[in-house]
Image: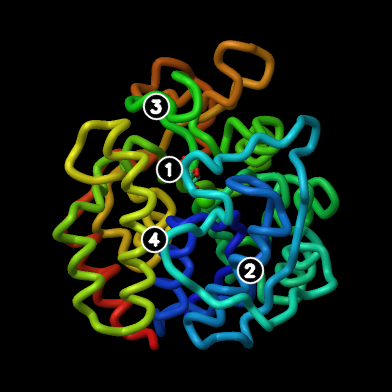
């Protein structure tokens, strides 16, 4: 089994990413650290607990992490995800409690305890917890197998400003630290997530599974779609964070190349822009694998099959 840690701010799309992983026998989800992002930390933590309960996997611990970016005021996205962050399905209030350990310390302790080269960090939100963990314990960077993140954009521009994608925009200093850290980063950016459209048909396929999880996923995707379809004028909303789980489960669905990525932290206009040297016009060192395209039918097929395994 591949050992993974989720760092996340759920979020309907985070939810689908996590549920898919919890349904996958190839993955050992060691734990989930939560971060402020789509909504404040209290709600991201509560939502993570709702998800482990929905999956019937309450033994997977949830560790609350940073309640704000490293050096900036928190920007949230209730306009996309609703007031709870997980609007759409009617999920019960969780009875499971979060852990006392801070999310960043959970990352540090886990990576130090496990064999080097065996733990993958899967990040679905602002990179605050990860940057804090790397700053406190630089030794863990080289012990990780890698980091697979949803964030950034190059060819597709931004979604919170014209230049920036939300996760990187919220804590650009944290993202800059991660790209500069030397960890092997795989980036699932808007360039690929904008190709993964949750069309009516694909949503109905989740509903038709007939289980609780399938119905919840259909309700979540129908909710976020209200926002994004109007925005993009396409046949369905982009499904962002599940690309991370899809990539870890089956990288053959995706294509990309090694690039240099740096994050803009100084400019007002382009704060949080991921400057990706896709065409190799500089000799800056390659620090990331940038995914550019994917087979969306295979991707949705994989997600649907996995969600179907849940209660
Ligand atoms: C990212 O921002 C959040 O709103 C989503 O959960 C996703 O992680 C997309 O830009
Ligand atoms: Ca997210």
Earlier along the polypeptide chain: callout 1 or callout 3? Answer: 3
Q: 271 or 13, which is in the foreground? A: 13
Q: Residue at x 35, y 64 (%)?
A: 219
Q: CA distance from mark 4 to mark 1?
A: 30 Å
Q: CA distance from mark 1 to mark 2?
A: 24 Å
The image quarter in which residue 247 lies: bottom left
Earlier along the polypeptide chain: callout 4 or callout 1? Answer: 4
Q: Position of residue 112 (x, y in %)?
A: 76, 69
Earlier along the polypeptide chain: callout 1 or callout 2? Answer: 2
Q: 300 or 143, which is in the foreground? A: 300
Q: Residue at x 68, y 53 (%)?
A: 35
Q: Residue at x 51, y 55 (%)?
A: 11
Q: CA distance from mark 3 to mark 4?
A: 27 Å
Say few, some or many: other residues with alpha carbon within 10 Å of mark 2 (under 14 / 14 to 19 / 20 or more): many
Residue under label 4: 220
Say few, some or many: other residues with alpha carbon within 10 Å of mark 3 (under 14 / 14 to 19 / 20 or more): many
Residue under label 2: 32
Residue under label 3: 154
Q: Are marks 1 and 2 in contact (CB under 8 Å)?
A: no
Q: Secondary structure at mark 4?
A: helix
Q: Is residue 66 left or right of residue 47?
A: right
Earlier along the polypeptide chain: callout 2 or callout 3? Answer: 2
Q: Is disc 4's CB within 8 Å of ligand 1?
A: no
Earlier along the polypeptide chain: callout 3 or callout 4? Answer: 3
């Amino acid at each position: 089994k591949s050992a993974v840690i989720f760092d996340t701010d759920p979020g309907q799309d985070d939810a689908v990413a996590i549920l898919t992983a919890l349904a996958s026998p190839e993955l050992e989800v060691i734990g989930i650290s939560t971060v402020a992002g789509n909504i404040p930390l209290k709600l991201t933590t509560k939502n993570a607990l709702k998800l482990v309960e929905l999956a019937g996997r309450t033994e997977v611990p949830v560790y609350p992490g940073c309640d704000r970016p490293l050096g900036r005021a928190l920007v949230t996205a209730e306009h996309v995800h609703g007031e709870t962050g997980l609007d759409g399905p009617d999920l019960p209030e969780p009875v499971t409690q979060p852990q006392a350990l801070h999310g960043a310390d959970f990352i540090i302790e886990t990576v130090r305890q496990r064999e080097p080269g065996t733990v993958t960090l899967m990040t679905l939100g602002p990179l605050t917890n990860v940057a804090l963990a790397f700053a406190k314990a630089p030794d863990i960077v080289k012990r990780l197998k890698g980091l697979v993140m949803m964030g950034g954009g190059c060819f597709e521009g931004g979604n919170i400003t014209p230049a920036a994608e939300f996760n990187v925009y919220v804590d650009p200093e944290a993202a800059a630290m991660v790209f500069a850290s030397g960890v092997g980063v795989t980036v699932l950016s808007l360039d690929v997530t904008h190709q993964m459209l949750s069309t009516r048909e694909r949503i109905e396929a989740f509903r038709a599974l007939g289980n609780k999880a399938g119905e919840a996923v259909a309700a979540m995707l129908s909710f976020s779609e209200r926002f994004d379809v109007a925005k993009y004028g396409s046949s369905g909303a982009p499904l962002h964070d599940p690309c991370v789980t899809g990539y870890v489960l089956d990288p053959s669905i995706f294509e990309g190349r090694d690039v240099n990525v740096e994050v803009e932290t100084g400019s007002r206009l382009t704060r949080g822009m991921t400057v990706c040297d896709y065409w190799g016009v500089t000799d800056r060192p390659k620090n990331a694998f940038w995914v550019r395209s994917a087979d969306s039918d295979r991707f949705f097929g994989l997600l649907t099959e996995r969600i179907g395994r849940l209660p």
